Amino acid sequence: MSVTAIGRAWAACDVGSGTAANGMTLLLLAPLIWIAAAVPWVVLHTTLGRRHRGAALAAGLVLTLWLTWFLVTWLGMPDSYPAPSCPGNVPPWWPGFIPA
């Protein structure tokens, strides 16, 4: 989900040198993002999940949502890149109630 949202943000704001280059970058980032998302679930399962499954599930969902938001706003909306089609480097489809 993070990789898709980052790709859509890059496409909407014309970030990068082209679709093929952006796709290759996302292809290389995908395993790292997957590992970063899987590690909290493993830690929660081994520590909290044995006794309190509901709490581990809730904490895992919160951590996954936070990680997705962080990655999309950090990687998908770079502040240093001049984006003429996206004011403030925020894509037009990004919801206004979620901070970017």
Image (spheres, rainbow, N blue to C red):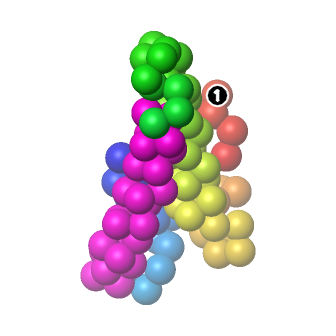
How far across and how far down the image is residue 39, in percent? Answer: 46, 50
Query: Is 93 drawn above or below residue 21 in the view shown?
Result: above
Question: Is residue 90 part of the magenta span, yes or no?
Answer: no
Query: Is 4 drawn above or below residue 41 in the view shown?
Result: below
How far across and how far down the image is residue 57, in percent? Answer: 44, 23
Is the stretch drawn in magenta largely helix, strand or loop? helix
- Amino acid at circle 1: Phe
Which residue does the image show at 67% across and 46% down from the upper left?
Answer: 100
Q: Nearer the viewer, residue 2 or 61?
A: 61
Q: Is residue 57 visible?
A: no
What is the span of residues highlighted in magenta in the rendered image? 20-45
Query: Is 86 drawn above or below residue 21 in the view shown?
Result: above
Which residue does the image show at 63% across and 33% down from the upper left?
Answer: 98
Which residue does the image show at 30% across and 73% down from the upper left?
Answer: 27
Query: Is 68 drawn above or below residue 10 in the view shown?
Result: above
Q: Nearer the viewer, residue 56 or 26?
A: 56
How far across and how far down the image is residue 58, in percent? Answer: 50, 20
Q: Nearer the viewer, residue 9 or 40?
A: 40
Which residue does the image show at 41% across and 49% down from the upper left?
Answer: 38
Q: Which of the 4 image quarters holds residue 41?
A: top left
SS of the residue at dot 1?
Answer: loop
Q: Read off the residue under disc 1.
A: 97
Q: Is residue 52 visible?
A: yes
Q: Residues within 10 Å of mark 1 (few under 14, many from 20)?
A: few
Q: How many marks?
A: 1
Q: Nearer the viewer, residue 29 or 88?
A: 29
How far across and how far down the image is residue 35, in percent? Answer: 41, 59
